[in-house]
Structures are given as C-alpha cells and as structure tokens.
Image: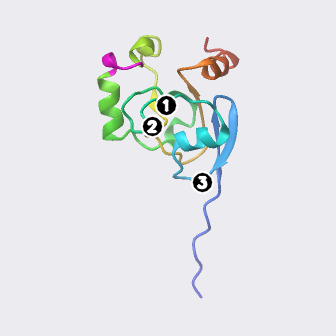
Amino acid sequence: MSSSPPAPEKVPCVINGREIRVWPGYRLWDAALDADAKLWQWCGGNGQCTTCAVLPLSGTENLSPPTRLERFSMKIWFVKPLAAIRRRWKGRDVRLACQAYVRGPVEVVGLFGKTAREARRAKGLE
C-alpha cells in the first residue's frame, strides 16, 4: 500500500482587513475579489497599471517571488499611478496583487482607495 501525500489545506489570507481562506497557489487578486476587499485594478489584472499594489504586513515570505512583469512594472513606476505613493513606501516590499500568489498565511493592505486607507489607518500606517 502506498500512502498519498496529505491534501493541502486552505490558508488564511487577509486583504484590507477582510479575511478569506484560500488554497495555496491562489492569486492574491482573486482572493481580494472573493473577499470583497476592494483592491483597485485598472488593467484587468495584467500587471501593467500598478493600481492593485499592496503592502504586505505579514507573511511576505508566503507570497510567490515577483514575476518578471511585476519587476518591470515596478521599475517604470514614474509613468504609473504608483508614482504618487512610491516615495511614501520607499524601502517597503510593495507587491502587485495581480502578480502575487499565496503560498501560506499572509496579510496585506492596498495602497489605493478608501477601503485600503481605512485598513492602513486601522493598522497605524496612516
């Protein structure tokens, strides 16, 4: 008899204060949609506009490494909405929710919009 590996368990994912449990490998943006966390997204989740930028509060190591597209989009920040807040979060690990995949427990807050601002305020970041 061979034993199969245990099935993966869902992990907690908190976005703008809204918690949802997701399977490892789930895209952070999709988790935000499912949780009604109100992350912005102008480009349709294609990694181009940077409006879904999030600031990881915990579990950064549980997000997939930045994709090549994400690294490129973050480099040309001066022509994107992220330019407006880039200086404020300099030195912090800003990620794009549409390009990050959840591998374990994680908590993030968005960088754009009223819901994100309220979530950052609740965490003492405003």
Disc 3 designates what residue? Answer: 23
What's the amino acid at mark 2? Gly
Q: Does the magenta portion include 34?
A: no
Q: Estimate the spatial distance between the alpha carbons at disc 2 and disc 3, rounded to whole Å.
A: 22 Å
Direction from residue 111 to residue 87 in the image, left or right? left
Q: SS at mark 1?
A: loop
Disc 1: CA contacts within 10 A as few (<14), some (14-19) or many (>=20): many
Find residue 45 and report its image quarter. top left
Element marked by disc 2: loop
Q: Looking at the picture, how far across and down is residue 33, in whole percent?
A: 60, 40
* Residue at 51% across, 52% down: 25
In the picture, which quadrant includes the N terminus? bottom right
- Amino acid tagged 3: Trp
Name the magenta segment's main secondary structure. Answer: helix
- Residue at 33%, 29% in the rendered image: 73
Name the spot of residue 62 as percent of width and height, x first: 52, 43
Local packing at callout 2 (Cα closer than 10 Å; few below 14, some 14-19, many 20+) is few
State left or right for residue 27 relative to residue 20. left
Task: Determine whether label 3 and label 1 are within 8 Å by CB.
Answer: no
Closer to the camera in the image, 96 or 12: 96
C-alpha span from label 2 to label 1:
6 Å
Name the front one of labels 3 and 1: 1
Q: Which mark is residue 83?
A: none
Where residue 90 sits: x, y (%)?
42, 16
**Residue contact between numbered discs 2 and 3, judged by CB atoms under 8 Å:** no
Residue denoted by label 1: 41
Contact between labelled residues 1 and 2, with CB atoms less than 8 Å apart: yes
Instruction: Tell me the mark number nearer the camera, choosing from 2 and 3.
Output: 2
Q: Residue at x 42, y 27 (%)?
A: 50
Q: Which residue is mark 2?
A: 44
Which range of residues does the magenta coloring cover? 77-81
Residue at image location 62% in from the left, 17% down from the top: 117
